[in-house]
Every structure is written in C-alpha cells, then in structure tokens.
Image: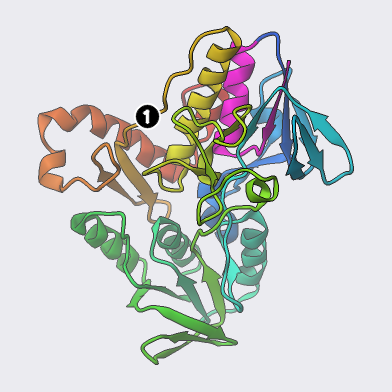
C-alpha cells in the first residue's frame, strides 16, 4: 500500500509522521517543493533576521518516510503527476499544500518562504531612518511589524489595516496595540487602495511615504485541487466530507489551509489537528474500521510581540474570543495551561511537537 502526502507543512508533516507510527506495512512518500520544513508562523523572524524558519525535513520526518523534492502538477485517477516529469501511483493521498499570498503590486509578501527571503534581503539593505510599511492587521501583520521594529529600532515601522487584530477580543486588541506602540510601531487605520512606488495610497485619499512595503495578508490557496478536478469552494479550497475526504475522490484526504472545513480559519492551530485526524482515520480504514468524523475545539490564539512579549487570547471552542472576565473562571484553568504553552511556542518557534515529542 502506498500513501502519498503532498505538502510538508504543519498538516502534511504531522500527518506523515503519525501515519508512519500507525501503519507499519504502508509505504509513505512525502512530496514537497523544497527539502526543508518551513515554519510559516516563524517567517517574520526569518525576514527580520532574528531566527530561522527552515528545518531540514530529514530531521522532521520519521525514518522510513521517503521524501520527493518536487511539486505536484496534477492529481489523477490514483496517480500524481510531478513537475519533474514523473508520476507517483497511490492508494491513498493526503493533500496538504496550504495557502498562499496574493500581494498588491509594489509589495513583498511575508507569508511565503520566497517572499520572506526577498523581504529579509531588502530589509537588511535599508539604511537608518527609512520607513517600513506592513499591510495587514491580522496576527501575521502584528507579529511582522513587531519583529521588524524590535530588530531594527533605527527604522520607522508602520502597520496599516482596517482592523487591528480582528480575531482578538477588545482587550486582546488593546494589548496588541500597546505592545506595538512600546516598540515604536505606528498603527494607521485604513483600507489600502494601491501602492505606487514609494507611496501607500489609502482609499480615504491619504498617501503614506514608504521605503519598503510588506504584504502580511494570507489569501487564496494553490490551484492544485481545482486543476485536478476536485470540487472546490469559491476560494479554491477543496470540499471535504465529515471525515476530511474529498467529496470528489474518497481516496484523497484534504487537510490544512487548502481544505474547506466549515468554521476553520487558516492557521497552524487548525492544520495540525486536521492532519492528525486524517492520519488516524486512514489508519482505522486500513484496519477495516469505520472512520470517525472530524471535530475540534479551539482553546486560544497566541502571537508574539517581538522576542520578549506575547498576547494570549483565550477563545471559545468555535475560536471566537473569550472576554477576560470569563477566561479567569476556574473552568478555564486547563485552557490557560494550553494557551501558556502556545505563548511559549510563539516566543521560541517550537516545532518539536510535529516530531511527536514534547519540548
């Protein structure tokens, strides 16, 4: 039996390792366009020069897993066509190609490895007193602005967004803003119209001077699912059943950002559990047991504000923010322990859990 995993991010790498532990008789091949595991939630450290987001996949994947460094062009009827001209036959496939960024012209995306590397080189070349503008007020934008400001206090750093920390409670938004302001980040509220050379133009008509503009918005997914004929939603994410299998081909599990899982936001916090569930479900099916539906409950969100500060947001199970006075109730103590670990990961860049070990 041959199991192919396309994508070695949080969902794919975790699923491959779990399958290797649970399906001793199966061959597992991981297909990934690079030989490294990229910690996407650490790309802000990569671009700021404060840390590394890449770990060799040979250190991440369990022994016995075959790594093919290639990109998948198309998924067919039991085969995957790779960009090196070869095909891989599979009995089961896990599609975990993640999400991507669609930056405005004149900006550099920070949510991809290639973009982060371009931004790192551009940032390192900036002399003092220049302006770095980060577009996007989600967790990626907040962490990017904070990391750059702390690493380069000689620069002026600005964060532009319609809402700062939209997934956070009001208290969480205030904490994030205070943390940014302590690092000297200017927070500008506004919607982007276009970027024209050294100016960021807002829809309000305001024009902001800039020397380097970073795009910190994650949007869209690779076209592999749609190109392969799998049913997708309006965003291009593959439609899945209750067990995370493609509604088009039950041999294909879809996990992580590229899966249209109802209520799930694009995040490593959702990709990891989906990868674990798909691996467990496939292992059950191989043993002749019935699959179980996927379900998960969120406990919180964590984001770093530079290297010495972090914001923790306790959440309800549906990932909506939990007000502070409710988070302090005794029933939330277990959640607090989990969220504290998340804060540790936010500061240190921990990825050891993917290997199946605790830090």
In this orientation, which residue lies closer to the viewer: 77 or 121?
77
Q: In the image, residue 234 lies at what x, y percent?
A: 50, 56
Q: In the image, residue 135 lies at what x, y percent?
A: 46, 71
Q: Which residue is mark 1?
A: 295
Q: Residue furthest right?
A: 85
Residue 97 seen anywhere in this rendered image of the structure? yes
The answer to if 218 sits in the magenta stretch is no
Q: Secondary structure at mark 1?
A: loop
**Identity of the residue drawn at 60% across and 87% down:** 197
In this orientation, which residue lies closer to the viewer: 311 or 279?
279
* Residue 186, quarter of picture: bottom left
* Residue 328, quarter of picture: top left
Number of marks drawn:
1
323 in relation to 190, above or below:
above
**Identity of the residue drawn at 54% across and 75% down:** 213
The magenta segment is 1-23
**Identity of the residue drawn at 39% across and 91% down:** 206
* Residue 121, quarter of picture: bottom right
In this orientation, which residue lies closer to the viewer: 250 or 222?
250
In the image, taking residue 179 as reference, residue 256 lies left or right, namely right
Q: In the image, residue 253 lies at what x, y percent?
A: 58, 31
In the image, taking residue 191 as reference, residue 9 lies left or right, namely right
In this orientation, which residue lies closer to the viewer: 250 or 216?
250
Q: In the image, residue 315 lies at what x, y percent?
A: 25, 42
Residue 154 seen anywhere in this rendered image of the structure? no
115 in relation to 212, above or below:
above
Residue neighbourhood size for the residue with mark 1, other residues' Cα within 10 Å, grouped as few (<14), some (14–19), many (≥20): few
**Identity of the residue drawn at 43% across and 67% down:** 136
């Amino acid at each position: 039996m041959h199991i192919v995993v396309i994508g070695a991010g949080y969902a794919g790498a975790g699923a491959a390792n779990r399958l290797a532990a649970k399906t001793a008789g199966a061959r597992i091949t991981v297909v990934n366009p690079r030989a490294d595991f990229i910690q996407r939630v650490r790309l802000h450290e990569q671009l700021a020069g404060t840390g590394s987001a890449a770990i060799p996949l040979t250190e991440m994947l369990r022994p016995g897993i075959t790594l093919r460094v290639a990109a998948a062009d198309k998924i067919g009827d039991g085969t995957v066509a790779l960009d090196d001209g070869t095909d891989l036959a599979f009995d089961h496939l896990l599609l975990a190609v993640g999400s991507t960024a669609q930056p405005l012209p004149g900006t550099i995306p920070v949510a991809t490895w290639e973009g982060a590397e371009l931004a790192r080189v551009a940032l390192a070349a900036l002399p003092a007193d220049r302006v770095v503008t980060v577009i996007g007020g989600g967790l990626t934008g907040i962490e990017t602005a904070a990391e750059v400001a702390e690493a380069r206090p000689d620069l002026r750093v600005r964060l532009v967004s319609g809402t700062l920390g939209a997934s956070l409670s009001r208290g969480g938004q205030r904490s994030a803003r205070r943390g940014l302001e302590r690092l000297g980040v200017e927070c500008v509220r506004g919607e982007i119209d276009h970027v024209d050379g050294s100016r960021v133009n807002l829809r309000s008509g305001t024009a902001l001077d800039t020397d380097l503009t970073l795009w910190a918005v994650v949007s869209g997914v690779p076209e592999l699912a749609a190109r392969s004929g799998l049913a997708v939603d309006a965003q291009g994410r593959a439609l899945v059943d209750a067990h995370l299998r493609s509604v088009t081909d039950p041999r294909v599990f879809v996990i992580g950002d590229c899966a249209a899982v109802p209520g799930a936001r694009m995040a490593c916090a959702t990709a990891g559990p989906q990868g674990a569930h798909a691996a467990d479900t496939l292992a059950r099916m191989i043993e002749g047991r019935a699959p179980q539906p996927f379900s998960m409950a969120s406990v919180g969100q964590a984001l770093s504000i530079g290297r010495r500060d972090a914001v923790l947001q306790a959440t309800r199970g549906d990932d909506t923010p939990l007000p502070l006075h409710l988070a302090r109730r005794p029933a939330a103590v277990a959640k607090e322990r989990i969220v504290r670990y998340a804060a540790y990961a936010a500061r240190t860049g921990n990825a050891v859990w993917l290997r199946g070990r605790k830090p």
